[in-house]
Image (tube, helix red, strand yellow):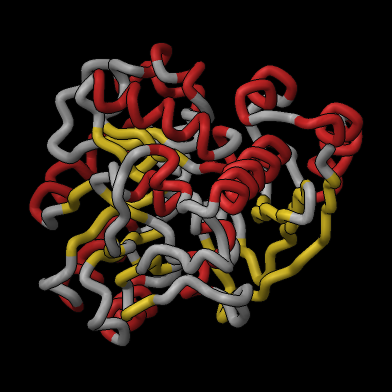
Amino acid sequence: MIHVSVEDIQWHMKKPFITATESTSYIDALLITLTSNGVTGRAETLGVDYLGENTDTIKRQIQEYLSEFTLGITRQSLQTILLPGGARNGIDCALWDLEAKRQNVRVWEIIGMSMKPVETLYTLPCDTPEEMANAARICPWAKQLKLKLDSNDVMEKLISVRDARPDADLIIDANTSWSPTLLDKIADTLASAKIQLLEQPLPTGDDAFLKDLNYPVPICADESFQSSTDFDRILDHYDAFNIKLDKCGGLTEALKIVNQCKKNKKKILVGNMLGSSLAMAPALIIAQHSDWIDLDGPLLQREDIHPPIHFEKTKMHPPDISLWG
């Protein structure tokens, strides 16, 4: 028997987190706790807001299948009960934590891998060229920067940041805001600025434009890619795939996507939907397999869960056993 607890939590951003599509001052999340025979596993989930998910829809999904979870859900059976998304992510990652604590081992030992510290990207919210350049200057300790850009003044913003931080590795996340025309126009500028990765430049309906495109910068799928069932459909459109546990529905599914990417020689970006150290902890498993790591959510918040992941600037250490896994 498993007791399921769902608790609302809220995290406030240090400053508004601005992308091409929204501005966020705080996030609502859910703390999922599973208890069995005195052993507790937990996880944090937010869901995918651009797909209409929020804490209320996630709670309704969990409530709908509460009797199955109570009788003793497994990670394997969970994949057939819930679709990819926040509800499955919360239950799946809590089950991993519960299993590790039952066995008195770490999650990565169950999987058969080791863990080491990793360097996360540090995100600069979308702003004016001057403000983005200033934001880049005041974090010299961040050697890898992720620029949130819309379709306005792209060249000016990019050049300003590059001039401010000639030493930094840069990737761009356009969050579906560009057009094929802009993508063509900006290609040489991206190459000369030595952009390492361009994430989701076009709306999801324009994926076909990217098929077999010989672009000077690798292009990564995010909004166009939710779970492993999307992989074959856009395999020839993207060079890399952004794996987010909230999107795909947990660590179990994320590990499956890692294998798909490796088999097809695709690069991996592990990302996040914002959240505390508890939301990032399972994703650190995927980070061990990733070419780029975007798990800076706790660095952008005023508060964090206890105990937090230990950060040395942008270096993330494996989670303490009392946090997760």
- Is 246 or 90 nearer to us in this picture? 90
Dividing the picture into quadrants, the one containing residue 153 is: bottom left
Q: Residue at x 50, y 51 (%)?
A: 282
18 sits to left or right of 142: right
Residue 102 x %, y %: 62, 48
Outermost residue on the bottom side: it is 138
Outermost residue on the left side: it is 192
- Is 43 or 225 nearer to us in this picture? 43
Q: Residue at x 67, y 53 (%)?
A: 41
Dividing the picture into quadrants, the one containing residue 84 is: top right
Residue 48: in sight, yes or no? no
Q: Quadrant of the N terminus?
A: top right
- Is 251 or 170 nearer to us in this picture? 251
Residue 57: in sight, yes or no? yes
Residue 163 x %, y %: 15, 74
Q: Residue at x 85, y 46 (%)?
A: 3
Residue 221 x %, y %: 39, 33
State whether residue 266 is above or below residue 236. below
Q: Residue at x 47, y 45 (%)?
A: 175
Dividing the picture into quadrants, the one containing residue 207 is: top left
Number of numbered discs overlaid on the protein picture: 0
State whether residue 209 is above or below residue 314. above
